[in-house]
């Protein structure tokens, strides 16, 4: 397992001490370093209609000894970071390699102020999910974004702006709160939104962002946006998926466009503002990502591929330690209910 850590060039194995150390830097400049350790992951499984408790699997993970940047701030500190990347050392990859879970995971993040949602080691079933292929051989979850439409009108942005190369591309990242566009696309996008806003709505600039004083529903003011990806997959964004409320002025709510720009960088990052209120399926085995609008306070059905090749489902909303009798026959599944919106970085 230590040799797998060397794949990312963030690890150093020390033969004299039989230790494997790592140093990792995040996009916001914060970092962590420490040592890889091995321990047991404890979980419950659902199999043949009943819950089996106290199941375990051996996994290797990083035990941090030093944090830098925002990770040292009290208002930014986290208990840990759960890595769900494609690399061999991520938890989902380790469980898949042991035949315990499929090489797929899904989430549905609630968009209300209370947070919450569900994280599934497996594939959430929803008939309206559309899929687009992952860009191969990338360290992040890169997709081929081809165009953006506002109120059904495609914006005049060259497709090359979103193309994936060494320092460019479109990334799905739940570890990012808002969303970001390249400078060449951001101005066109904001201008298109602005052109649809009624002149009676007062505009203001808050913290460098284009904002508006709204006394009615944002659905009555802001247009629908469509992010158009390869394979014919479009992600429809309603106003709540790209505007955020900052404060209030004189009884009017200040709503701002939640897509920002990163000066000097040509990267598109789709963070939680876009991902919330949707099912997202990371089908790593088939190298694709799918999504569908969904009320994440509702239960979800999950598909797990059995050893005999069949695919069955269970209703996650029926899970409880006290009433397993209502759970239909299924293969092994894992569920992690998020009672608060935690930072889950898909490294």
Image (spheres, rainbow, N blue to C red):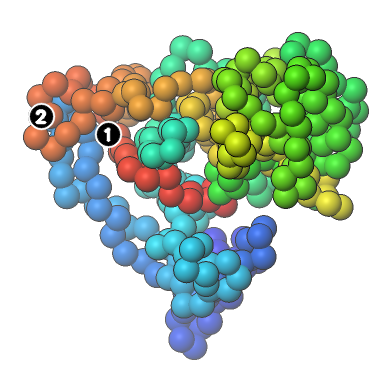
Q: Looking at the picture, how far across and down is residue 252, in whole percent? A: 60, 32
**Mark 2–mark 1 CB contact (< 8 Å):** no
Measure how far apart labels 2 and 1 are at the Cα level.
17 Å
Q: Nearer the viewer, mark 2 or mark 1?
A: 2
Where residue 34 appears, as percent x and y from the top left, is 49, 75
Q: In this view, does 61 lie above or below 53?
A: below
> Mark 2 sits on what residue?
323
Q: Where is residue 95 in the image (x, y as percent from the top left)?
A: 39, 47
The circle on residue 221 is none
Quadrant in the rendering for residue 130: top right
Q: Is residue 39 toward the left or the right of residue 219 in the image?
A: left
Residue at 76% over, 32% down: 203
Q: Could you tell me how many numbered marks the image carries?
A: 2
Q: Is residue 231 visible?
A: no
233 or 3, nearer to the observer: 233
Q: Which residue is drawn at 86% across and 42% down?
A: 183
Residue pictured at 46% horizontal, 72% vertical? 64
How many C-alpha atoms fall within 10 Å of the one at disc 2: few (<14), some, or many (≥20)?
A: few
Q: Nearer the viewer, residue 62 or 270?
A: 270
**Would residue 123 be found to the left or right of residue 153 on screen?**
left
Q: Which residue lies furthest to the front in this view?
A: 250
From the image, tell me which residue sits under label 1: 332
């Amino acid at each position: 397992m230590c040799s797998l850590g060397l794949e990312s060039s963030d690890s150093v194995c020390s033969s004299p001490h039989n230790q494997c150390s790592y140093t990792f830097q995040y996009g916001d400049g914060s970092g962590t370093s420490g040592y890889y350790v091995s321990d047991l992951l404890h979980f419950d499984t659902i199999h043949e209609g009943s819950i089996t408790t106290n199941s375990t699997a051996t996994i290797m993970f990083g035990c941090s000894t030093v944090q830098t940047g925002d990770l040292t701030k009290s208002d930014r500190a986290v208990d840990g970071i759960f890595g769900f990347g494609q690399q061999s050392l991520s938890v989902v990859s380790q469980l898949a390699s042991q035949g315990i879970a499929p090489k797929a995971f899904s989430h549905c993040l609630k968009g209300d102020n209370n947070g919450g949602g569900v994280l599934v080691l497996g594939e959430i079933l929803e008939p309206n999910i559309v899929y687009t292929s992952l860009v191969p051989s990338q360290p992040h979850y890169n997709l081929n974004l081809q165009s953006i439409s506002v109120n059904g009108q495609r914006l005049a942005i060259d497709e090359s702006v979103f193309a994936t190369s060494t320092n460019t591309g479109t990334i799905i990242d739940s570890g990012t709160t808002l969303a970001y566009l390249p400078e060449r696309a951001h101005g066109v996008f904001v201008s298109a939104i602005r052109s649809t806003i009624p002149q009676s709505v007062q505009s203001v600039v808050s913290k460098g962002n284009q904002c508006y004083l709204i006394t009615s529903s944002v659905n009555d003011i802001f247009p629908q946006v469509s992010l158009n990806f390869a394979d014919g997959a479009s992600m429809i964004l309603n106003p709540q998926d790209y505007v955020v409320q900052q404060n209030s002025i004189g009884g009017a709510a200040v709503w701002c466009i939640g897509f920002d720009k990163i000066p000097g960088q040509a990267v598109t990052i789709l963070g939680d503002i876009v991902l919330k209120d949707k099912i997202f399926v990371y089908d790593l085995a088939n190298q694709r990502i799918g999504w569908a609008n969904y009320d994440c306070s509702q239960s979800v059905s999950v598909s797990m591929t059995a050893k005999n090749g069949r695919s069955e489902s269970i209703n996650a909303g029926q899970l409880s330690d006290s009433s397993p009798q209502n759970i239909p026959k299924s293969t092994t599944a894992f569920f992690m209910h998020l009672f608060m919106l935690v930072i889950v970085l898909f490294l």
